[in-house]
Image (cartoon, rainbow, N blue to C red):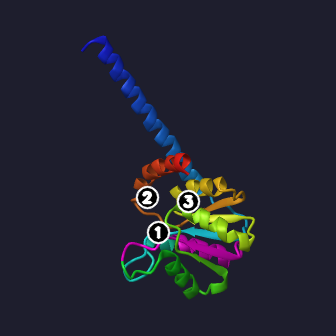
Amino acid sequence: MDKKDKGRRRKIKTAGRLILLWIAIHSVYITFDGLYEYKGNADIAVVLGNRVEADSSLSPVLQGRVDKALQLYRQGRVHKVMVSGGKGMLAGKVPEGLAMKRYLVQKGVPSADIIEDNDGENTYYTAKDFKAANDSLHCSSVIVVSTFYHITRCKYIFRKLGIRNVHGASSDVFYANDLLGLPREFLAFYKYLIWY
């Protein structure tokens, strides 16, 4: 192996190490940011969707998110809850927003205090839909509710769309596959940074 090849390999190894370091630093940051819970009040909580089961019940991940919003509502820290998700892939399955709304109503939240959005196919569309709904809601502060590693991207896209007073609260439920969510979230964050 000549000096040129050795130099090229060294550069590739150095670049690989720098990328891994970048991923690690980013993952630590979004973990701390996501687990730091805003202690104040806001006008509304916006819950980001996740899977709805075939029987129309909430998946454990989604129930954890909705339970966090319910806690905020019961504590009087928010007065309204927006539940936002997609329509789902299975024919006949209840859309995420509707499933979340039904769950909250069963838990005693008045239907009038819940804004249902079934077009929030991703974080960007949820933020966009909230911005449109907020023309009539006139909310000046928001708490986004999701899984801890998703909070940083949620706050970023809401702020990018002009919603300034945005805070986060993460689900109190944790799973082993949350560790897989961290590298995925690294890619998703930079996709949003570039794409939206």
139 lies above or below 161? below
User: Which residue is more in the foreground, 157 or 107?
Assistant: 157
Whichever of callouts 3 and 2 sits on the residue coming sooner in the sequence is 3
Specify the farthest residue to the top.
Answer: 3
Crowding at dot 2, Cα within 10 Å, few <14 / some 14-19 / many 20+, comes out as few
Point out residue 8 in the picture as x, y percentages from the top left corner. 35, 20
Point out residue 161 in the picture as x, y percentages from the top left corner. 65, 56
Q: Residue at x 66, y 55 (%)?
A: 159
Reading the image, the residue beneath label 2 is 178
Disc 3 element = helix
Tell me if residue 75 is in the magenta stretch: yes
Reading the image, the residue beneath label 3 is 124
Tell me if residue 101 is in the magenta stretch: no
Point out residue 94 in the picture as x, y percentages from the top left corner. 44, 81
Instruction: Give the residue type that dot 3 points to.
Output: Tyr
Point out residue 23 in the picture as x, y percentages from the top left corner. 47, 42
Q: Residue at x 55, y 87 (%)?
A: 106
Instruction: Give the residue type that dot 2 points to.
Output: Asp
Crowding at dot 3, Cα within 10 Å, few <14 / some 14-19 / many 20+, comes out as some
User: Which residue is more in the foreground, 178 or 159?
Assistant: 159
